[in-house]
Amino acid sequence: MRFRLSLLAAALFAVAASASAQYRGGTVEIEGFGGYLFGGGLGHFHDFTDNNCCHDSHLSVDNNAYYGGRIGYNFNNFWEVETEFAQSKTHLEIENHDHHNDIPDIRVGDMRFDYFMAYMTMNFGGTSRFVPYFTLGSGAVNLHQNIFGGLENTEAHYTLGAGGGIKIFVSPHFAFRFDARSYSSHLSDHDICGPTFCSNNTWITNVVTNGGFVVAF
């Protein structure tokens, strides 16, 4: 029994040692991930039917699930280029911010974000088993809106992305990844509109947290 335990401990030590000593230049990393999107605000809700209406109400994106995949290539132990596809199917809501008027939030439509991004990532761990990183990139979001009342359209918008996190290698070829990042997408005037309302923000920023599993080869 002691002999078997010794063999198990030696095997675990060997895996940990190999993960901590790996040179990652020239390797490819494929990751699937899932997480949570914290929706951004789209500005004051403007009701066309009442010019005195809704100054304390805002049009916002609801929080919801978020998932996707990434492919990265390591030039060396520090620099990595990544591409990403991520999606969140969420909703549009009018939120009342008037504390003196207890009006419930109103769901006015559905919204789907499809992010197509490219990043340059700097890994700080070198050959370590634990690899913190910072990432910065840009791309586009395919914004599909379905406003209740029959209005539905899809448009692409320029998007900036930034974030950071950590990769934890359990072997040279497998790692867990924990990540947080933001997406800031540029909107034209009145891009988000319903039959009687429009948003007034020219940018929308969503913040996400996610975790995934990396396969490296």
Image: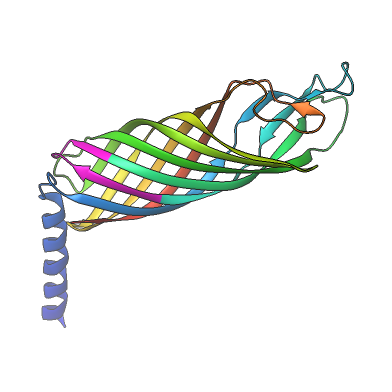
**Residue 154 lies in magenta, yes or no?**
no
Give how far across and how far down residue 121 sits, in percent.
Answer: 27, 35
Which colour assignment does the render follow?
rainbow
- The residue that appears at 51% across and 28% down in the rendered structure is 185
Q: Is 193 placed left or right of 2 in the picture?
A: right
Q: Is 136 placed left or right of 158 in the picture?
A: left
Query: Could you say which is closer to the camera, residue 207 or residue 167?
Result: 207
Q: Quadrant of the C terminus?
A: bottom left
Q: Is residue 213 above or below residue 85?
A: below
Q: Is residue 90 above or below residue 16?
A: above
Give how far across and how far down residue 190 sits, in percent.
Answer: 67, 23
Q: Is residue 100 above or below residue 194?
A: above
- The residue that appears at 15% across and 62% down in the rendered structure is 15
Give the image quarter of residue 196: top right
Residue at far bottom of view: 1
Q: Is residue 182 above or below residue 16?
A: above
Q: Which span of residues is magenta-colored?
A: 69-81
- The residue that appears at 77% across and 43% down in the rendered structure is 150
Give how far across and how far down residue 84 sits, in percent.
Answer: 37, 44
- The residue that appears at 34% across and 48% down in the rendered structure is 70
Give the image quarter of residue 213: bottom left
Give the image quarter of residue 198: top right
Query: Could you say which is closer to the camera, residue 178 or residue 12?
Result: 178
Query: Could you say which is closer to the camera, residue 214 or residue 109?
Result: 109
